[in-house]
């Protein structure tokens, strides 16, 4: 593991492997002693993350190159020493912001885990959130990488301690409380009904026309309302929802082929393509990294 880690870090720094060829690599995994946390270490050059969202938080420390992050209403460029922070259910996309791509270490803590730390540190009541998507904060980035190293070394005490120190620091520096939901507008109610219907029909979704009829609206009105509520059109949200469901199945040991059918993709290659674009690794690699392969 340490030898591979050193090789990957060298590739991220130099932009090439031992043969002088630019390459991408990624590892996405979780660790039983740290429930509520996923980890990703990667270097991407050509890979593009389509618009998607996460149930929990995204904390990414860029170590090399530049990551271009597209968020609602803005596009940011994150270089070495910066920390990218994305709150739950915020639609975003990412790609290389420089020819050499970017390398980073990312943590995906759950809402429950961040809320636990927030409560323990006296954070105001409500759902914790970060007040900015990017910060020039090498120290916090160093803590993200330190959590990764501790996990890779199998040191549960250090990993858990460093993770909680990091979350407490970020909540202290950038923490706020997510605004309480305002009374739902007609458009939001339309979007919510459409989302619930898509969840029910994940493997057999309606057309936009059928979706609009089911919620008592017009296709363009549903499209506008859905994008305003969830940051992406219904078909993009559906793919993201299928990939989320696929992650749950894969980590319980379901094979990629069985998963593809269960979540509504036409075949395993379709699962592979969409899963890899959104998660950053193949379904097989994701399953093996969780000891389910």
Image: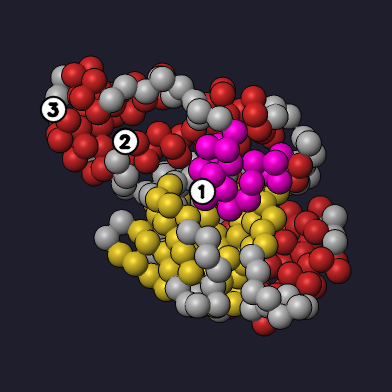
Asked if the residue at tag 1 contacts the one at tag 3, i.e. Cβ–Cβ closer than 8 Å, the answer is no
Query: What residue sits 85% from the left and 67% below the top?
Result: 2
How many angstroms separate mark 2 from mark 1 (CA)? Answer: 16 Å
Q: Position of residue 188 (x, y in %)?
A: 22, 34
How many neighbours does mark 1 have within 10 angstroms: few (below 14), some (14-19), or many (20 or more)? many
Can residue 201 be seen at all in this image of the molecule? yes
Residue 250 to residue 37: above or below: above
Mark 3, secondary structure of its residue: loop
Asked if the residue at tag 2 contacts the one at tag 3, i.e. Cβ–Cβ closer than 8 Å, the answer is no
Mark 1, secondary structure of its residue: helix
Q: Which mark is residue 166?
A: none
Q: Position of residue 92 (x, y in %)?
A: 40, 54
Residue 81 to residue 214: above or below: below
Q: Position of residue 150 (x, y in %)?
A: 79, 61
Main SS type for the magenta part?
Answer: helix
Q: Which residue is mark 1?
A: 278
Name the one closer to the observer, 161 or 222. Answer: 222
Q: Which residue is mark 2?
A: 234
Query: What residue sits 40% from the left and 34% below the top?
Result: 238
| Label whose residue precedes the other's in the sequence (3 or 1) | 3
How many angstroms separate mark 3 from mark 1 (CA)? Answer: 30 Å
Q: Which residues are magenta?
A: 268-287
Tell me the quarter of the picture where residue 35 sits: top right
Query: What residue sits 73% from the left and 75% below the top?
Result: 17
Q: Is residue 118 left or right of residue 239?
A: right
Q: Position of residue 212 (x, y in %)?
A: 20, 24
Q: Is residue 251 left or right of residue 101?
A: right
For the C terminus, give its image quadrant. Answer: top right
Q: Which residue is mark 3?
A: 218
Name the one closer to the observer, 259 or 140. Answer: 259
């Amino acid at each position: 593991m340490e030898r591979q880690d050193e090789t990957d870090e060298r590739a991220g720094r130099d932009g090439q492997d031992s043969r002088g060829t630019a390459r991408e690599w990624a590892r996405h995994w979780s660790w039983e002693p740290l429930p509520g946390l996923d980890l990703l270490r990667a270097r991407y050059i050509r890979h593009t993350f389509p618009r998607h969202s996460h149930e929990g938080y995204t904390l990414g420390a860029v170590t090399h190159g530049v990551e271009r992050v597209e968020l609602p209403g803005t596009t940011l460029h994150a270089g070495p020493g910066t920390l990218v922070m994305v709150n739950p259910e915020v639609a975003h996309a990412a790609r290389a912001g420089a020819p050499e791509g970017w390398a980073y270490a990312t943590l995906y803590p759950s809402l429950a885990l961040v809320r636990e730390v927030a409560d323990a540190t006296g954070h105001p009541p409500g759902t914790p959130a970060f007040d900015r998507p990017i910060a020039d904060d090498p120290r916090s980035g160093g803590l993200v990488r330190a959590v990764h190293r501790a996990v890779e070394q199998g040191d549960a005490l250090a990993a858990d301690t460093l993770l909680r120190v990091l979350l407490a620091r970020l909540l202290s520096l950038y923490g706020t409380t997510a605004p309480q939901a305002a009374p739902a507008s007609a458009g939001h109610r339309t979007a919510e009904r459409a989302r619930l219907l898509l969840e029910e029909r994940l493997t057999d979704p309606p057309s936009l026309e059928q979706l609009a009829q089911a919620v008592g609206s017009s296709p363009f009105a549903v499209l506008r309302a859905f994008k305003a509520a969830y940051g992406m059109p219904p078909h993009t949200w559906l793919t993201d929802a299928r990939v989320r469901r696929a992650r749950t199945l894969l980590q319980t040991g379901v094979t990629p082929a069985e998963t593809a059918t269960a979540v509504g993709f036409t075949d395993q290659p379709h699962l592979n393509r969409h899963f890899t674009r959104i998660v950053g690794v193949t379904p097989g690699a994701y399953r093996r990294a969780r000891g389910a392969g």
